[in-house]
Amino acid sequence: MTEARGASPTADPTTGRPGYALRTATTEDIGGARAVMLDTVYHDLRSGYVPRWHADIIDLEGAYLRPERCTLLVVRHGGEVVATGAVRDRGPQAPPNPRWVADRFPSGSTAQLCRIYVRPEHRRHGLARLLVRELGAFAASAGGYTSLYLHTDPAVPGAEPFWRSMAHEVCDERRLPGGGQGIIHFELPLPAPAGP
């Protein structure tokens, strides 16, 4: 992970924000990360836990901590996990996603950003943007990835403008016949790998 430059002396060097610490998740973080994710799917996404969409939340270690080219980052504040973000090594599947989107972002060569969630009381501190930057750096250094993909639910407050500020829209399913799943697919530039 990169260190913040120009941070105040009281700011954490990993985030540049006082009181917040960003790190790669360990088994110690699993319970807190899972709580952030489940609270988000119940309260923000309003889908509740759906096994076919959220199985990774139950097995965070198997999904993100053990695989080499996957990762889970957490931001801690006051000893608690308050934000999460992950990279997984698979692209969108068809169905339910449009076939052409799945073909554009094949598993193996696509780094998918996911589970970028921040507890409501910790939003507006730049934590999601920080997580995206660090996850992109991880994907670039992991090797073998040619694209950085994500999808978002525009019904989540602030999600659509946030992603539009940093990513390129690939497909807004709301414009498809029948509205698709109502989600938006995005691509971000894959950063150049960090030098030695």
Image (cartoon, helix red, strand yellow):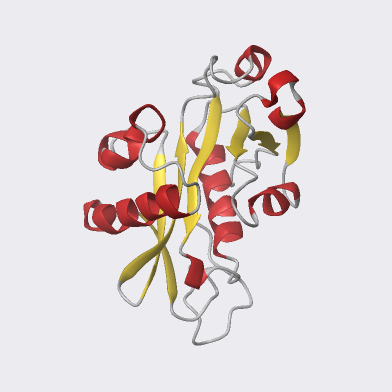
Residue at the image position 53 percent from the left and 24 percent from the top: 91
**Looking at this rendering, what residue extends furthest in the bottom direction?**
9
Closest to the observer, 173 or 10: 173
Horizontal and vertical percent for residue 86?
45, 44
Closest to the observer, 156 or 31: 156
Residue at the image position 50 percent from the left and 41 percent from the top: 114
- Whether residue 137 is visible, yes or no, is yes
Closest to the observer, 173 or 86: 173
Q: How many marks?
A: 0
Query: Is residue 148 shown above or below 83?
Result: above
**Looking at this rendering, what residue extends furthest in the front direction?**
178
In the displayed structure, does residue 100 sit left or right of residue 68? right
Query: Is residue 117 shown above or below 11?
Result: above
Q: Picture quarter containing residue 99?
A: top right
- Whether residue 196 is visible, yes or no, is no
Horizontal and vertical percent for residue 76?
38, 68
**Looking at this rendering, what residue extends furthest in the left direction?**
28
Horizontal and vertical percent for residue 184?
67, 35
Residue at the image position 60 percent from the left and 66 percent from the top: 126
Q: Picture quarter containing residue 53?
A: top left
Closest to the observer, 1 or 196: 1
Query: Is residue 4 shown above or below 33?
Result: below
Horizontal and vertical percent for residue 170?
74, 30
Residue at the image position 56 percent from the left and 26 percent from the top: 110
